[in-house]
């Protein structure tokens, strides 16, 4: 199995919410949206001013806004075979990329697009820094161990078990990639594994104010993070960790 050398995240929006969602993430990341591409102009990249991209948007036919991952590997087909042996299911073969679902039903793609350099965090006019730096996999309790095991096997990343009294484990890449994976054991069952973004910022309140000004809705405050939704209703969290260096 080829180990990932990069991880990208796709924001998937139905046609009626695509424009609002893409504009919001372009605004809060400070990344410029690329020209549309694909057979139906459905794909675009959020291009950072430095480093390689890792955030993209896609217009999909239906459903609710959601997140999926692109896992970048040298050998797409050998990795797909190994993933299938670990419980994944092949959904579509597009030639240059393969779409699969994890054992818990989470969609991801295997791609071989080159990328090597993690972008720096965004610097806001007031001087604070921020970026998206992890994807949290939201896993129903009955699927948690199998899903955690699957992603550890697929990535080969360092595994941190769920501490006593917590619901969060972690998979951290050994190299300096833009995204790591948090794994969350949900309290309640749901049909499939889902995912959301986690942000980091050097000034939590300033970052929160900037997101709300851009159209986010504040939903809940917790000790270590704040829950928001973008203008389409897609949930994400602003954490109190620091952008650089990376802290758990």
Image: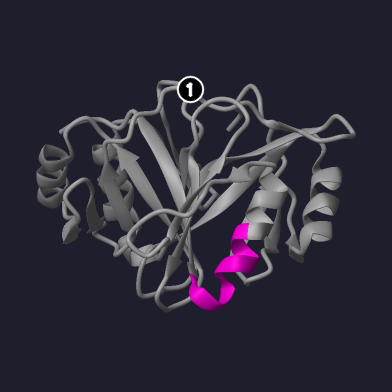
Q: Name the image colouring.
A: one colour
User: Magenta segment range?
Assistant: 14-22
Residue 180 lies in the magenta-colored region? no
Residue 21 lies in the magenta-colored region? yes
Q: Is 72 positioned to the left or the right of 48 in the image?
A: left
Q: Residue at image x 25%, y 30%?
A: 3
Q: Is 154 positioned to the left or the right of 8 in the image?
A: left
Residue 2 vs 97, above or below: the answer is above
The answer to whether any part of residue 138 appears in the image is no
Query: Quick one: SS at disc 1?
Result: loop
Bin the neighbour count of mark 1 within 10 Å (Cα to Cα): few under 14, some 14-19, many 20 and up. Answer: few
Q: Quadrant of residue 122?
A: top right
Q: Residue at image x 71%, y 49%?
A: 28
Q: Position of residue 203 (x, y in %)?
A: 82, 37
- The residue carrying mark 1 is 117
Q: Is 178 positioned to the left or the right of 70 in the image?
A: right
Q: Residue at image x 45%, y 48%?
A: 9
Q: Position of residue 202 (x, y in %)?
A: 78, 33
Q: Quadrant of residue 161?
A: top left
Q: How many marks?
A: 1
The answer to whether any part of residue 231 appears in the image is yes
| Figure quadrant of the N terminus | top left
Q: Residue at image x 40%, y 76%?
A: 61
Residue 137 vs 235, above or below: the answer is above
**Which secondary structure class fits the magenta region best?**
helix
Q: Position of residue 41 (x, y in %)?
A: 42, 61
Pick the residue in front: 85 or 114.
114
Q: Position of residue 243 (x, y in %)?
A: 67, 30
């Amino acid at each position: 199995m080829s180990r990932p050398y990069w991880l990208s995240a796709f924001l998937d929006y139905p046609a009626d919410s695509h424009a609002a969602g893409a504009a919001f993430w372009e605004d809060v990341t400070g990344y410029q949206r690329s020209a549309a591409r694909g057979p139906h102009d459905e794909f675009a990249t959020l291009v950072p001013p430095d480093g390689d991209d890792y955030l993209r948007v896609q217009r999909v036919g239906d459903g609710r806004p959601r997140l999926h991952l692109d896992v970048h590997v040298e050998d797409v087909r050998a990795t797909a075979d190994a993933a299938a042996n670990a419980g994944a299911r092949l959904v579509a073969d597009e030639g240059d990329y393969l779409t699969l679902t994890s054992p818990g039903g989470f969609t991801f793609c295997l791609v071989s697009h080159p990328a090597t350099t993690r972008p720096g965090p965004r610097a806001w006019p007031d001087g604070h820094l921020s970026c998206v730096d992890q994807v949290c996999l939201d896993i129903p309790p009955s699927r948690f161990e199998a899903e955690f095991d699957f992603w550890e096997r697929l990535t080969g990343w360092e595994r941190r078990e769920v501490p006593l009294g917590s619901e969060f484990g972690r998979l951290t890449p050994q190299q300096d990639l833009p995204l790591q994976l948090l794994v969350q054991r949900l309290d309640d069952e749901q049909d499939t594994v889902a995912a959301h973004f986690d942000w980091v910022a050097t000034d939590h309140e300033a970052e929160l104010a900037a997101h709300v000004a851009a159209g986010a809705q504040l939903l809940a405050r917790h000790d270590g993070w704040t829950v928001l939704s973008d203008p389409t209703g897609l949930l994400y969290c602003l954490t109190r960790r620091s952008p650089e260096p990376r802290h758990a």
